[in-house]
Amino acid sequence: EVQLVESGGRLVQSGGSLRLSCAGSGFTFSHYALSWVRQAPGKGLEWVSGISGSGNGAYYADSVEGRFTISRANSENTLYLQIHSLRVDDTATYYCARSPLMGRPFYAFQIWGQGTVVAVS
Amino acid sequence: DIVMTQSPLSLPVTPGEPASISCRSSQSLLHSNGYNYLDWYLQKPGQSPQLLISLGSNRASGVSDRFSGSGSGTDFTLRITRVEAEDVGLYYCMQGLQTPLSFGQGTRLEIK
């Protein structure tokens, strides 16, 4: 079964740091670009960051540029999101999602994880 | 950055009746390869989003043929031929043409 499973979300204080993980299974991990999408409580979806299958191309939303770093370890089938200088408005459920291609454009997120919750106080 | 605008934001529908949602983008989503990079997603209550339609009109695997997408350039529409109770949730359009990607505000479909 093709699957993405996020982890690492927790309650953290404003200004702190956190690393989220997304483990993939059931497919050749390096063949697909991946993205992080977040959803604040009661709000809509917001694309945060995306990375190519090789890891050579990384892209960010303006709202997180400079504070978030996306990376991947293809040998471990794992996607990461390193978050620094956390703010209250980063509170959200963070989803990882898979594109159908190795690179851009990122679209058609057919596979989504269940999400991991980040709460910033 | 591309701004996505959906309407309506709330859509009460009687079961068995049709429904449609409009999505407009601030720039054309038509790529030089001829594809429109516009997706539609449904987020059912308490669940992760699921892909319904990609590239403007391509129904995703396993999606009911009651759902269809149309449009090109900056104007797109999601149509449901006969709404069922299981269709309740938030519908989002998303442009994938360029980063940063962007979603519409979401349309909440509810059953009358």
Image (spheres, coloured by chain):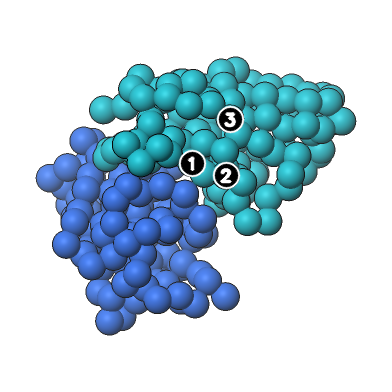
Chain colours: A blue, B cyan
Res. B4 image quadrant: top left
Please tell me whether residue A28 is drawn above or below residue A79 in the rendered image: below
Residue at 81% x, 33% y is B82
- Taking the view exactly as shown, the residue that stands out farthest to the right is B16
Please tell me the numbered disc located at residue B58. 2
The residue positioned 26% from the left and 28% from the top of the image is B1
Instruction: Say if mark 1 contacts mark 2, CB within 8 Å.
Output: yes
For label 3, the crowd category at 10 Å Cα-Cα, with few meaning under 14, some 14 to 19 and many 20 or more, is some
Chain of the residue where label 2 is placed in the rendered structure: B
Q: CA distance from mark 1 to mark 2?
A: 6 Å
Q: Is residue A65 left or right of residue A100?
A: left
Q: Earlier in the sequence, mark 3 or mark 2?
A: 2
- Quadrant of image for the C terminus of chain A: top left
Viewer-proximal residue, A1 or B62?
B62
Residue position for label 1: B55
Residue placed under numbered mark 3 in the picture: B70
SS for dot 2: strand
Q: How many marks?
A: 3
| Quarter of the N terminus of chain A within the rendering | bottom right
Secondary structure at badge 3 equals strand
- Front residue of this view, candidates B1 and B107: B1
| Kind of residue at badge 3 | Ser
Which sits earlier in the primary sequence, circle 3 or circle 1? 1
User: Distance from label 3 to label 2 (Cα)?
Assistant: 9 Å
